Image (cartoon, rainbow, N blue to C red):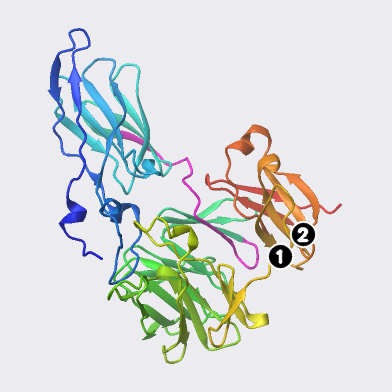
């Protein structure tokens, strides 16, 4: 266990960048601008409040240098543009910046992009006077090279879709993109609003959205009126939100390690919930408070449940904020051989109020006491080519699942009880299905519209027609 000290800031790697004369092979100069390094905390979320990261290997914490990924001279030979990425990071395009240099001596003119706004690609205009830069958030920016400033921006392309929700009355679509929540009309997709957001939660009783921001503020947005109220008190990025079943109260968790309870009718803070502390690795004294990633009120009770760091689940008494019980998950077998960095603990949490239990991954627990009940009995196998993640129809008779392999681009319609395939509907056509990564399909409340969100940012919408 280490504090975030010089180890995480030390440049363990560097990139050598040399420019040669193509004819004589003579070294002309070296680029000497200091490059950013991708640190552990850049590529990993914090593990806990008091144990922000853990590694049995120093390599897991080493800073990784960005290196030239692609380079091009302008047609005039006046400038050199280099796109930098960290090749040793599996998602290298998330840490991608563009730098433009004076070609004669390598003096840095401009840096475009950052780890917060990575650059995907670039291209010079034929005359070399302008450069078109594409960011991973879907922005296109046209720069005047001589002036080293943008002359045009376009935000018409869609970034990666991180979350999707449909209001209870089916009138509005909520789409979570990196740093932004977009609210659209379901009837035609028209954009209603675009709001700063790192997470959101939809009220179960009205068209009201709780929006968590990176600065710790919670916005309460009324979709119909457009009115926004603010809840302030957190000092870190909001990580999880939950409405009470009647919509009158809100629970919120943030990176400041606090878990707060709000009265929405009065618009006031009520109390904090007790913080949970565990020793996740069982190695000497490495206790830490957990960061909560997911929250849910338990319908019909006065309890709140949340899961967070190291697969730790806690149950709280809502009126008092006191902890009822804590469940510490077992270390996943898949991580036992490579304990170098990052958590290897289960993270999926779900409630089964009807049967008085909850689940952490495939393990069942008693809802009242947290007592382990054993592994969940396997459900009937899904048909070949249909993924196990599925959405139930309103009447519970059907399951809708995304197809894979030979069923790419299809939605599998299954009997909920037997998992027998009823129909396979081709919703993403032909070659396009190879490049689109669909999420679980969702039906509108009236069952007449099918929505298929995709990781690429688009949402496919289909009318359901009775046969």
User: Dot 1, how many residues are within 10 Å of its Cα: few (below 14), some (14-19), or many (20+)?
Assistant: few
Q: Residue at x 21, y 25 (%)?
A: 146
Query: Residue at 54% of width from left, 66% of height from top?
Result: 224
State which mark lies toward you, 2 or 1. Answer: 1
> Pointer 2 and pointer 1: residues touching (CB < 8 Å)?
yes
Q: CA distance from mark 2 to mark 1?
A: 9 Å
Q: Residue furthest top?
A: 23
Rendering coords of residue 222 (x, y %) = 50, 69
Position of residue 339 in the picture relative to residue 315 (left or right): left
Rendered view: 249 above or below 132: below
Classify residue 440 by image quadrant: bottom right
User: Is 207 within the magenta?
Assistant: no
Q: Is residue 357 at least partly visible in the picture?
A: yes
Secondary structure of the residue carrying numbered label 2 = loop
Residue at the disc numbered 2: 419
Q: Residue 149, position in %: x, y?
A: 25, 34
Return the mark for residue 379: 1
In magenta, the rendered stretch is 151-171
Q: Earlier in the sequence, mark 2 or mark 1?
A: 1
């Amino acid at each position: 266990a280490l504090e975030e000290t010089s180890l995480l800031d030390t440049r363990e790697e560097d990139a050598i960048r040399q420019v040669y004369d193509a004819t004589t092979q003579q070294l002309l100069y070296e680029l000497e601008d200091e490059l950013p390094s991708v640190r552990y905390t850049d590529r990993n979320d914090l593990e806990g409040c008091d144990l922000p990261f853990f590694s049995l290997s120093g390599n897991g914490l080493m800073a990784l240098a960005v290196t030239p990924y692609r380079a091009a001279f302008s047609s005039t030979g006046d400038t050199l543009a280099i796109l930098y990425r960290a090749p040793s990071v599996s998602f290298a395009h998330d840490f991608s910046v563009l730098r433009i240099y004076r070609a004669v001596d390598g003096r840095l003119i401009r840096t475009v992009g950052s780890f917060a706004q990575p650059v995907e690609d670039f291209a010079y205009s034929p005359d070399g006077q302008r450069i078109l830069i594409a960011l991973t958030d879907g922005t296109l920016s046209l720069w005047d090279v001589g002036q080293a400033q943008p002359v045009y921006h376009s935000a018409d392309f869609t970034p990666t879709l991180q979350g999707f929700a449909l209001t209870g009355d089916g009138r509005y679509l909520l789409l979570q993109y990196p740093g932004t929540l977009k609210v659209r009309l379901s009837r035609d997709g028209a954009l209603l609003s675009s709001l700063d957001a790192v997470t959101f939660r939809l009220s179960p009783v009205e068209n009201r959205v709780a929006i968590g921001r990176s600065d710790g503020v919670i916005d309460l947005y009324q979709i119909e009126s457009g009115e926004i109220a603010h809840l302030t008190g957190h000092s870190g990025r909001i990580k999880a939100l939950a409405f009470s079943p009647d919509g009158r109260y809100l629970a919120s968790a943030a990176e400041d390690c606090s878990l707060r309870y709000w009265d929405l009718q009065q618009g006031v803070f009520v109390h904090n919930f007790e913080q949970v502390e565990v020793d996740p690795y069982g190695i000497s004294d490495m206790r830490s408070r957990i960061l909560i990633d997911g929250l849910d009120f338990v319908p019909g009770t006065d309890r709140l449940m949340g899961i967070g760091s190291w697969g730790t689940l806690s149950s709280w008494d809502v009126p008092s904020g006191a902890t009822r019980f804590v469940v510490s998950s077992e270390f996943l077998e898949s991580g036992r051989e490579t304990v170098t960095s990052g958590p290897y603990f289960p993270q999926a949490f779900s409630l089964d109020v009807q049967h008085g239990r909850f689940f952490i991954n495939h393990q069942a627990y008693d809802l009242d006491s947290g007592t382990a009940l054993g592994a969940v009995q396997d459900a009937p196998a899904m048909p070949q080519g249909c993924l196990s993640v599925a959405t139930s129809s309103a009447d519970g008779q059907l399951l809708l699942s995304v197809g894979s392999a030979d069923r790419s681009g299809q939605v599998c319609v299954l009997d909920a009880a037997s998992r027998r395939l009823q129909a396979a509907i081709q919703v993403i056509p032909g070659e396009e299905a190879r490049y689109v990564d669909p999420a679980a399909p969702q039906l509108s409340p009236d069952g007449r519209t099918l929505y298929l969100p995709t990781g690429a940012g688009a949402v496919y919408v289909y009318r359901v027609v009775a046969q």
